[in-house]
Amino acid sequence: MTAGPLLRPRRWRTTAAHRRLAAETRLAPADLVLPLFVGEGRGDATPIASMPGVVRHTRDTVRAEVTRAAEAGLGAVMLFGVPDHKDAEGSGAWDPKGILNRTLREVVTDVGDSILVMADLCLDEFTDHGHCGVIGTDGAGRVVVDNDETLDRYARMAQAQAAAGAHVVGTSGMMDGQVAVVRRALDDVGRSDVLVLAYAAKFASAFYGPFREAVDSSLGSDDSVPADRSGYQQDPGNAREARREVRLDVAQGADAVMVKPALAYLDVVAATRAEVDVPVAAYHVSGEMAMVEAAAERGWIDRDRAIVETLTCIRRAGADIVLTYWALDAVRLLQAGPAGGRMVW
Ligand code: PBG
């Protein structure tokens, strides 16, 4: 008989018990953040066609969902407001009675500090042109999203969200200097307790498509403004630049930094984890989930396995925190056992 290999990595894969002890990456509900959309109407939630299983909540339905998230042990929820009324500067964003601030107040009253409530800090849902900031002209007369004028609005929005009870504000607009301005604005009103989650490396991605339906985005409807966000979101091919963005946000006081989207950018997630000592988040975005849902609907992919694999691998790449529309599905799958009884690992 020939001697077989001396070294046998397969030994660790012998049974589920072996694999459990050898597992390098675990998923827990506390690592997950559930994004939620809230519109102005009352009564029932509205399904979002391009995001199966995701709804646009009303103020009535969102409260129960946030309570469910708290009871499931999720790390946080991230709230997005979908206002009926939009204007050029997005004034609904800092109106204390605006949809997002009003909802924040209600859900934080319900859940207190039992789960973190995060608020999206960006103007795109509130502007009639759909951009993440106010429109102006640069020194050469080009029509652009005016960075510094926008910062002024972000400061007001941060203060309004803090007053409404947000534990964390998520600066997602990709304006230069936004983290420092928001940090200062919060500190100025005595809210040094509120954390800033910086969308530090946010790419101009095709994978945001379904989200834009979810928030009823006006982007692309107005010919007099830039057609897309490539004047402020990053070129998908730029990894060095992403590291620079991350360093700048940490230097400005970010409490956590995010990479977005997740799957096509796992190298950026890994590089970010190596670069900083604050928590790193990754956002598994609408188009990424829609692809899996669409394939699962056709019977081309096992949805449950794809969910656990996707979230596990985003964590493996270096994300401490994962924003995912599947957060509650994932908790259900994890409770059924790491294998859901059916997984291979
Ligand atoms: C912008 C914002 C976007 C997403 C969340 N906040 C993207 C954009 O429109 O540029 C995308 C989230 C997703 O696709 O799931 N405030």
Image: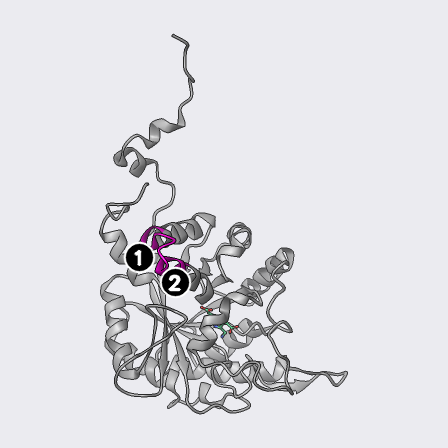
Residue at image position (64%, 56%) is: 240
Give the residue pinned by disc 2: 324
Q: Position of residue 39 (x, y in %)?
A: 36, 83
For the residues marked 2 and 1, what is the alpha-carbon distance in whole angstroms? 9 Å
Give the residue pinned by disc 1: 330
Q: Position of residue 95 (x, y in %)?
A: 43, 90
Q: Kindly give the residue lying farthest to the right in the view shown.
A: 140
Kindly state the secondary structure of the residue where label 2 is placed: loop
Task: Tell me: residue 104, above or below residue 303.
Answer: below
Amino acid type shown at disc 2: Thr
- From the viewer's perspective, tell me whether residue 269 is left or right of residue 164: right
From the viewer's side, name the closer residue of 162 and 313. Answer: 313
Rendered-image quadrant of the N terminus: top left
Q: Residues within 10 Å of mark 2 (few under 14, many from 20)?
A: many
Q: Position of residue 121 (x, y in %)?
A: 47, 77
> What is the chief secondary structure element of the magenta stretch?
helix
Query: Magenta segment, which residues?
Result: 292-305
